[in-house]
Amino acid sequence: MLSKDQHRSHELPWGIEITQFLYLIFSIFLTIAFLAGLIISKEINLSIWEVGLAVIIFWVLFYGTYKIRSWVVAPILIFSTLSAFWGFIEIVNFKPTNYVDLAKKTLLILWTIFFLFQLYIFSRTETKTFFQEKGKIIFS
């Protein structure tokens, strides 16, 4: 087994750098959206707290992928599965009526593709070996 320092000296498996970058971008964007929602909104409602929960999840997953922690594989697989499933349901049920709705649907499709990409990357044996993930997950 390689130590964490030896892992850093080796090249990351395919897709991990993309994942780290996208988690960082999503984390920053969601943090800004959450803070803007808190500042602009006169009352705190459930949707603001949903964004706050997403902020926490994305920052934790970014930290886990950046620091190469073995515990990050299972949450990414579970979160990606739930998000991809939700994305498919939303894509099927969302009927665009104008160009703004069409742009929303396009972003929703890209969002769902990102989570499918995560499922592919983090269910690969090379990725699990790199992260030293030893447990069996339903998605293995």
Image (cartoon, rainbow, N blue to C red):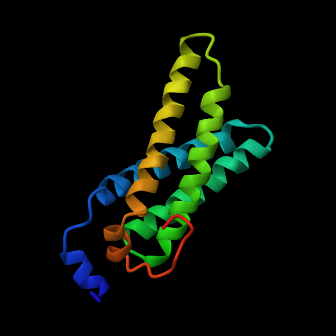
Q: Can residue 14 be seen by looking at this rendering? A: yes
**Residue drawn at 48 percent across, 70 percent down:** 72
Lateral position of residue 116 relative to residue 83, left or right: left
Q: Is 93 in front, or is 29?
A: 93
**Residue drawn at 26 percent across, 58 percent down:** 14
Query: Could you tell me residue 129's position as x and y percent?
Result: 34, 76
**Residue drawn at 38 percent across, 58 percent down:** 121
Q: Is residue 47 depicted above or below 69 in this figure?
A: above
Q: Is residue 90 depicted above or below 66 in this figure?
A: above
Q: Quadrant of residue 91?
A: top right
Q: Is 42 in front, or is 26?
A: 26
Query: Could you tell me residue 128's position as x and y percent?
Result: 38, 72
Lateral position of residue 112 relative to residue 16, left or right: right
Query: Could you tell me residue 49's position as x and y percent?
Result: 72, 50
Q: Quadrant of residue 12?
A: bottom left
Query: In which quadrant will I find the N terminus?
Result: bottom left
